[in-house]
Amino acid sequence: MTRTRMTAVDRAWLRMESTENPMMIGVVLVFDQPISLKRFRHLLEERFLRFRRFRQRVVQSGDRAWWQDDPYFSLDNHLHITGLPGKAGQNELQALASDLNSTPLNPQRPLWQIHFVENYGEGCALIVRIHHCIADGISLVRVLLALTDDEPDSNLYQLPTRPQQTPDRGKRLASASREMRNTADAGIQQLRVFARNVASKRGYPLQLLKTSGKIGMECLKLGLSPSDPDTRLKGSLSGRKLVAWADPMPLSDIKNTARALRGTVNDVLMSAATGAIHQYLHDQHEPPPDSGIRVAVPFNLRPLRQPVETLGNQFGLVLVPLPIDESCPRMRFHQVQENMNRLKRSWQAQVTYSLLDLFGRGPDMLERRAIQLLSSKASAVLTNVPGPKKPVYLAGARMSQPMFWVPQTGGIGIGLSIFTYADTVQFGIIVDRKLKVDPQRVIAAFNQSIADLQAAAGSPKTYPEVERRRAT
């Protein structure tokens, strides 16, 4: 039976699975009208399952792991039809997503599931769970978007007149070979750049030596940095998750604020998340720590022109200091901006990626202890992923709101997600139920923080959540 060796980094994410933190990327996609189940199944077969990884399960032996074709693969094991009671709304959908994101995937089957929610609002919704060892967030967003089209009507939705042919052994081997080449492509490109630089630049060896010194300093700083201070954001975990998301807000407002403050959209959104935590702790009568906190932020290392077919994990983590002790929105913005600019020039993302590669090759106990140590240095995971700039359609239905959450590692129990889509910004949160954190209040605080930044920039705006919060 054909199988492919799992990369060390992907294996590191596989072994991070714990009772408290299942290593799943969770996605909720809301559509403005019902979707034909027959068409949706066809889309999965034609566009999703063409990625061979989704037909493969994980096989382990000792310290090694492989991707192996599931001989009993059936789409019915992964696509589940469900409904919400009565005229259920966002609260009920959030409750279902919370329950599913608390439930580990079946390790005996390919590590993904989709729940098709038939009756939600005027349309329907999809709740998708995919294990992090399959791919990172950016790659999976690209995969899920491959199911969609730019127009509501597409000839690709026509059902096939002939059944699909099962690829023969030669084609399967060729496909496996392509996967291996794609996985190694990034490393080969780096080696070529290295060789060209050595040959063409007389001072390159000295520059390389200096870079090695910087990388060593990053490792030292990462290891010696203190643990994050104790707040209600940290504590023992139960594994039961609560997820929530805010109403979309106009991206144009965020861009205007960024322009007025002489920063980027990312600076504004990171500052808004900082302000949300500051405001939430203040509302709970808990003084923010003077040292602030850190959040772990994924940093993409994937080549921009890499084919969408390439799965796997190609990102590092950077620990971003958030000045949650600062009460002035403008000062918070400038401090976050300075911290982000400094980290962009550092080698921290490459260092953490290399550490994951090292952990994936070593014993399980070493990885767990290292993950516990690294996770103690952050209070949350924060992701900011750009999505399509224009609306997309799935089986003729317009996607009205997408949201996703990445898993937390070690002792981290909070994940904050920011996603831009069709000129809107989506903000969501996932939190362990045992922590004393109300996700709805954090969302209200995020909207308030955006409004405070806009006021500081001279362009005040109001949002429904902010008005409701002020009224109470």
Image: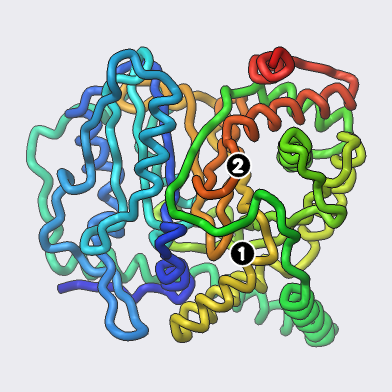
Q: Nearer the viewer, residue 28 or 194?
A: 28
| Residue 290 in the figure: left or right of residue 389 | right
Q: Amino acid at mark 2?
A: Val
Question: From this viewpoint, is residue 269 visible?
Answer: no
Question: From this viewpoint, is residue 399 visible?
Answer: yes
**Which of the 4 image quadrants contains residue 316?**
bottom right
Do labels 2 and 1 touch, CB within 8 Å? no
Label 1 element class = strand
Q: Which residue is mark 2?
A: 437
Q: Quadrant of the C terminus?
A: top right
Q: Amino acid at mark 1?
A: Gly
For image coordinates 55% across by 78% down, the residue present is 369
Outermost residue to the front = 285
Identify the mark nearer the N-term, 2 or 1: 1
| Residue 433 in the figure: left or right of residue 330 | left
Q: Quadrant of the N terminus?
A: bottom left
